[in-house]
């Protein structure tokens, strides 16, 4: 056995992200309200940034200027200070800069909206505390960004990754499910309740009976049919009552506790309108100020006789560099959103013309390939963003939907949203005395060439906030 100490050279490739690139990704993922808050913070900290004067005539502003013109005193009554810049020095001071730039910045700062921590931010913070490989972290972020406000998957997790990453995806779903709050990263509220039971160490027959109660007998328990449920599970009624009382202590929608109580404003980033039979796409920039570098600040230079001359110049240089970087990052975000908007109009052309029934199956990968971007970039870009259409303001993510194959091999695949729309039409159009069961709805969909399981029908029905046939019959 050789225990000698030596040096070995090895060659390996490693990808590292610069702080600037990380900030670029963060700005890309921000909603309009989040970006407003980011700009607000930057303006407070960076004097090189300014909001250019708007070309809007204000009577109040004219009156203020006239008043200040008559009352301004140009005499110098300050005490002598040997460190004060002398006339002719390179430091330029502008009273108009101080007043007007301050006014514009303050008006924007007062109008920006603040908000509390979101579910995604809370989960990302926990994920960052775990010791994981870079690829695991990336998949974990994809899973978290795919969660809705309830904490449930919006798109099938398998559609987020490449085939070779499927195994790691399953392990990372387990990792995300282990984070707080319990029950997140589930398909629906039923799976969430079962995950919370496992988190509470419910095992063996207790977990088996609880799972069966949640999956198949909730509607009966809501109608106090405890005896029928106990018979179906093969357990005493008292045990069913205990399980049901325990169930009531759980939260079926764990993500809602991180939703702010105040009104949430949906500010669309994209606007698509049908005008004279043609679609018009517009990037909404009205809610974000146009930032620029303050020319007065950029011309500042320190006095060479000042002991802090180098530090002053370095501060000015870094402030301008940081401001230019932020402006370019915001521009990159706008360019990316515009490109995605063009792709959405191309892929979902029929939806924008005819409504939700015409929504086509669409994945991040399809748009990423067209734009030569990574799928994660598309996922970040649409996270928390909204689009204003002729059919209302909706999350951009709703335009992405998995494909559901039809029985007809020559027929086009339908999106999940289109199938849900057909389901709602079937249920609302039913005129019989007895409500349609989930199995009957599945049979009627099969007659239209849409073959999906009864459990899938139940899942879609819950997403539409439609009660089961048991409840609709009472």
Image (cartoon, rainbow, N blue to C red):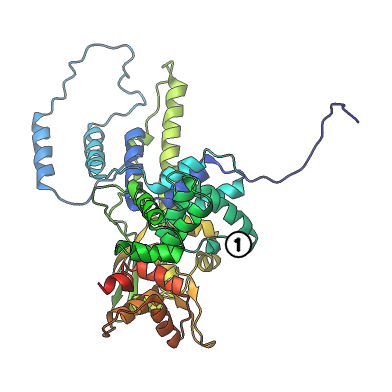
219 in relation to 152, above or below: below
Above or below 461: residue 315: above
Q: Nearer the viewer, residue 51 or 262?
A: 262
Near-viewer residue (365 or 301): 365
Question: Horizontal and vertical percent for residue 266?
Answer: 29, 57
Residue at (76, 43) in percent of width and height: 11
Around disc 1, counting alpha carbons within 10 Å, would you say few (fewer than 14), some (14 to 19), or many (20 or more)? few
Please state the horizontal and vertical placement of residue 173, each as a whole percent of the image.
53, 53
Q: Quadrant of the N terminus?
A: top right
Q: Residue at point 42% right, 16% down?
A: 305
Q: Please tell me whether mark 1 sits on a helix, a strand or a loop.
A: loop
Q: Which image quadrant is residue 162 in? A: bottom right
Asked if residue 391 can be seen in this view, the reply is no
| Image coords of residue 290 (percent x, y) | 32, 49
The residue lying toward the viewer, choosing from 115 and 334, is: 115
Q: Residue furthest right?
A: 1
Q: How many marks?
A: 1
Q: In this view, does 123 lie to the left or right of 57?
A: right
In which quarter of the view is residue 306 placed?
top left
Determine whether, in the image, residue 8 is placed left or right of residue 36: right
Q: Position of residue 462 (x, y in %)?
A: 36, 67
Please tell me which residue is depicted at 16% across the width and 24% down the height of the picture: 74
Q: Which residue position is annotated with label 1?
A: 162
Q: Quadrant of the C terminus?
A: bottom left
Which quadrant of the view contains residue 374? bottom right
Instruction: Judge whether residue 323 can be spotted in this image.
Output: yes
């Amino acid at each position: 056995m050789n225990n000698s100490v030596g040096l070995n050279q090895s060659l390996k490739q490693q990808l590292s992200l610069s702080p600037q690139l990380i900030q670029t990704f963060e700005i890309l993922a921000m909603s309009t309200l989040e970006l407003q808050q980011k700009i607000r913070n930057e303006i407070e900290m960076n004097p090189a940034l300014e909001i250019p004067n708007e070309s809007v005539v204000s009577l109040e502003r004219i009156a203020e200027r006239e008043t200040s013109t008559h009352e301004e005193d140009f005499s110098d009554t300050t005490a002598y200070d040997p460190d004060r810049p002398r006339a002719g020095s390179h430091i330029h001071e502008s009273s108009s800069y101080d007043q007007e730039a301050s006014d514009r910045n303050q008006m924007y700062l007062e109008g920006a909206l603040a908000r509390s921590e979101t579910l995604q931010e809370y989960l990302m913070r926990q994920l960052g505390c775990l010791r994981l490989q870079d690829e695991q972290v990336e998949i974990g972020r994809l899973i978290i960004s795919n969660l809705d406000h309830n904490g449930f998957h919006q798109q099938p997790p398998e559609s987020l990754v490449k085939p070779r990453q499927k195994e790691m995806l399953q392990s990372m779903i387990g990792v995300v499910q282990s984070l707080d709050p319990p029950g997140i990263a589930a398909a629906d509220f039923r799976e969430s309740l079962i995950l919370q039971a496992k988190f509470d160490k419910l095992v063996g027959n207790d977990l088996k009976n609880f799972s069966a109660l949640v999956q198949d007998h909730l509607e009966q328990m809501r109608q106090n049919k405890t005896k029928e449920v106990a018979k179906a599970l093969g357990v005493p009624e008292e045990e069913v009552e205990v399980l049901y009382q325990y169930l009531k202590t759980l939260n079926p929608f764990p993500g809602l506790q991180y939703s702010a109580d105040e009104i949430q404003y949906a500010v669309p980033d994209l606007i698509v309108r049908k005008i004279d039979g043609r679609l018009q796409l517009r990037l909404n920039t009205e809610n974000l100020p146009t930032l620029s570098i303050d020319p007065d600040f950029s011309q500042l230079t320190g006095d060479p006789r000042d002991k802090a001359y180098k530090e002053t110049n370095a501060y000015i240089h870094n402030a301008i560099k940081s401001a230019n970087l932020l402006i370019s990052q915001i521009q990159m975000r706008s360019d990316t959103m515009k490109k995605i908007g063009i792709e959405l109009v191309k892929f979902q052309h029929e939806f924008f013309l005819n409504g939700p029934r015409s929504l086509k199956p669409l994945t991040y990968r399809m748009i990423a390939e067209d734009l030569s971007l990574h799928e994660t970039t598309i996922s970040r870009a649409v996270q928390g963003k909204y689009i204003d259409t002729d059919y209302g303001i909706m999350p951009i993510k709703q335009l992405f939907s998995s494909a559901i194959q039809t029985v007809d091999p020559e027929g086009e695949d339908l999106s999940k949203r289109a199938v849900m729309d057909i389901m709602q039409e079937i249920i609302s159009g039913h005129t019989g005395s007895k409500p349609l069961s989930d199995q009957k709805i599945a049979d009627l969909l099969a007659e239209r060439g849409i073959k999906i399981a009864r459990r899938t029908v139940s899942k879609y029905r819950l997403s539409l906030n439609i009660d089961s046939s048991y409840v609709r019959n009472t």
